[in-house]
Image (tube, rainbow, N blue to C red):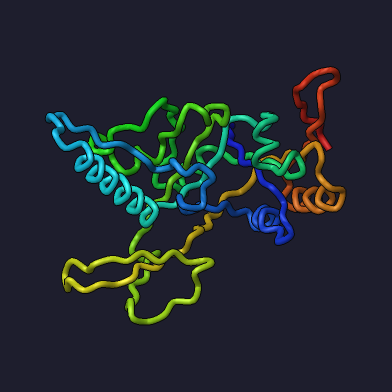
């Protein structure tokens, strides 16, 4: 059984534990990510650029428009190949106080428009030579330690509500609102969609962080027993910088 892993922190709202209990994963909008260069490509011109300022402005506009399209149309679930990466525990599981969940790769693939390993690069790719989806799988070399895989979900018509721009919209916390021109009526409108899309994906195994709190640990163990999935406690390997998993 091939697994991919997701690291979770535990905050006061306890969404991550709730989602474990519900057996769901969350696909997030690109603008929620911690890397500001997500979805950024570059435009390559072959002709002699006699007016560099002009072409730089054109390029910036094209790149920004492309990123806005990706934010509007896609949601992303990020995961990784390893459950014992100390940096991932530190960065994504709140300094080892969270937990890590393993999911079947085929289950993630079944609920995604596309599942693919991230490609790491020293510079952005030419956005005019790539599909929208391909851009979502490109990141800087500096993130290579993550060994990331991504399941992307492309929004369908049922995920989008068309709103009158003259009517106020108050749910800016959970909804994404994108200005748009209807090509049939040539009238402005607002495209509203959920910032987060939830999908059913049964967890297969859970690893508890080295510093997880006792209350959080007990709650997650109870959930895993009810779901009939194994639970492991991460511990330091003696006299080393590495982690090991011990069955609970």
For the N terminus, the quadrant is top right
* Left or right of 22 in this view: 131: left
Residue at point 43%, 42% (across, down): 38
For the C terminus, the quadrant is top right
Residue at point 15%, 29% (across, down): 46
Residue at point 34%, 75% (across, down): 163
Residue furthest top as drawn: 239
The x and y percentages for residue 56 are: 25, 40
* Left or right of 100 in this view: 158: left
The x and y percentages for residue 176 are: 44, 64
* Location of residue 204 with respect to 201 vertically, above or below: above
* Left or right of 136 in this view: 238: right
Residue furthest bottom as drawn: 167
* Left or right of 116 in this view: 50: left
Q: Where on the picture, by quarter, is residue 119?
A: top left
The x and y percentages for residue 170 are: 49, 76
The x and y percentages for residue 7 are: 65, 41
Disc count in the image? 0
Q: Closest to the observer: 193 or 38?
A: 38
Q: Closest to the observer: 219 or 60?
A: 60
Residue at point 77%, 39% (across, down): 209
* Location of residue 241 with respect to 175 vertically, above or below: above
Residue 128 shows up from this direction: yes
Residue 107 shows up from this direction: no
* Location of residue 174 with respect to 100 vertically, above or below: below
């Amino acid at each position: 059984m091939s697994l991919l892993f997701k690291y979770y922190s535990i905050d006061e709202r306890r969404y991550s534990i709730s989602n474990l209990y519900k057996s769901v994963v969350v696909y997030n909008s690109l603008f929620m990510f911690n890397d500001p260069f997500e979805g950024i490509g570059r435009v390559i011109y072959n002709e002699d650029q006699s007016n560099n300022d002009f072409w730089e402005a054109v390029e910036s506009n094209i790149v920004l428009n492309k990123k806005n399209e990706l934010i509007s149309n896609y949601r992303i679930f990020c995961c990784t190949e390893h459950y014992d990466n100390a940096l991932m525990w530190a960065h994504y599981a709140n300094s080892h106080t969270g937990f890590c969940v393993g999911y079947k790769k085929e289950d993630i693939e079944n609920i995604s428009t596309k599942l693919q390993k991230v490609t790491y690069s020293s510079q952005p790719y030419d956005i005019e030579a790539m599909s929208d989806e391909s851009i979502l799988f490109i990141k800087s070399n500096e993130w290579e330690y993550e060994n990331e895989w991504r399941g992307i979900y492309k929004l369908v018509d049922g995920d989008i509500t068309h709103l009158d721009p003259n009517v106020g919209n108050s749910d800016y916390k959970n909804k994404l609102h994108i200005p748009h021109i209807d090509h049939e009526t040539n009238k402005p409108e607002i495209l509203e969609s959920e910032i987060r899309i939830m999908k059913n994906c049964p967890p297969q195994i859970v690893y508890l962080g080295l510093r997880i709190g006792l209350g959080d640990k007990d709650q997650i163990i109870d959930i895993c027993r009810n779901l009939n999935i194994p639970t492991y406690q991460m511990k330091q390997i003696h006299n080393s910088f590495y982690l090991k998993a011990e069955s609970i």
